[in-house]
Amino acid sequence: MAQVIAIQMGLLYLLHTEYHHQQQQQQQLLTKSSSGPNIHGASNNLHSSPVKTHARFGGSASYRRPAFLSKKKMTSCGLFRTSSGTAAVIFLANIWVLLTLPASIQSTHCYTSALARGVEGRHCEKALEKIIYDVNQTLDDDSRSLTVFHKTCLVNVQKPRRSTPSRGQIEAAVFEVIHSCPGKGGVTISSTNLIAIVHRTTSKNTYEINQPRCDKQRCAVSQEDCMAAFQSLPLNRKGIFIGQERVYASNATRGNCLVKIATTDYAPFRASHVDVGGSFRVLVNGCKQHAPGVIFVNGGTAGFNGDLRISIRNSDHDRLDDSDR
């Protein structure tokens, strides 16, 4: 307890020093404003291709962003630019956030690759709003992973199955990454094995619902073989897909077509052939000449935030790969 208090007092001192330093900088900038432009006034307009995200039901209309994030601009250094009239409020808000972060947070690692740069904190806030919780504002106990994204920011949360972290714990962990790794993203790990990962979005780590993604190379599969493989995916007595425990994925091969289905959140399946048959036909029709191909279907898992991933590929290609090893 004494160690925690000492750390908190140290943070208060550092923030207090930073506050006065920012005040001095602002005063200097005001003094120089008549003789030259304010170089810190330029906004950091990062170019990013808009990523179409899929809607989640049960969005959080009651979500309130922390005061220090409201209507602020990010400078190129990753610091929030404010007017002197609100500096004291920002200073106190930062103290509140740091002191209310869970003591269980053990470590935070920031990405250093140039490709990781360009994550905007405000986009991470929007991504967090897409997470679905139960009435008690906790996650479900069936899933082990969830992914949400908005424009430049992708948030991935991982937890042990049967664990039900609260909304506050998740948001605090993500904000820890945002503040420790401004503009870059990173990973925070807690002593309860809650992991929060913030990435820059790319075309490879995001997806659109019911939009087939086909390989650019020409590698055809038989439409009839793919439909037969899809129909032979294992089911339980209720007609729901079943898969290997923990990963909840299964596959089937017919002719030259290999079909795989999995849940994105590592939760049990809650879908049948009837539920995803239409999406699978869209995948086969779109990618039959350019396999491998993949499509994502909204829901279909026991978790609140999971989707189904269905893929097809030429099974002859797999056999060729195996022979080369």
Image (tube, rainbow, N blue to C red):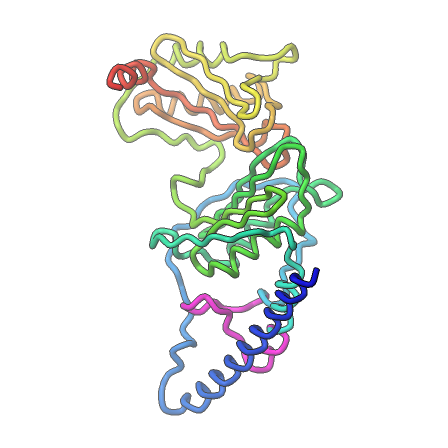
Looking at the image, residue 141 sits to the left or right of residue 87; the answer is right
What is the quadrant of residue 66 in the picture? Answer: bottom right
Q: Which residues are magenta?
A: 70-90
Instruction: Tell me the residue at 53%/41% (across/down).
Output: 147
Instruction: Tell me the residue at 61%/35% (across/down).
Output: 160
Quarter of the image where the N terminus is located: bottom right
Q: Where residue 26 sits in the image (x, y, percent)?
A: 49, 83
Q: Where residue 232 sits in the image (x, y, percent)?
A: 49, 9
58 versus 226 height, above or below: below
Pick the residue in front: 151 or 317: 317
Looking at the image, residue 66 sits to the left or right of residue 44; the answer is right
Instruction: Tell me the residue at 57%/17% (across/down).
Output: 241
Instruction: In the displayed orientation, state which residue is furthest to the front.
Output: 2
Looking at the image, residue 156 sits to the left or right of residue 257; the answer is right
225 versus 73 height, above or below: above
Looking at the image, residue 239 sits to the left or right of residue 316; the answer is right
Q: Where residue 213 sits in the image (x, y, percent)?
A: 38, 31
Instruction: In the displayed orientation, state which residue is furthest to the right.
Output: 136
Pick the residue in front: 1 or 228: 1
Pick the residue in front: 298 or 259: 259
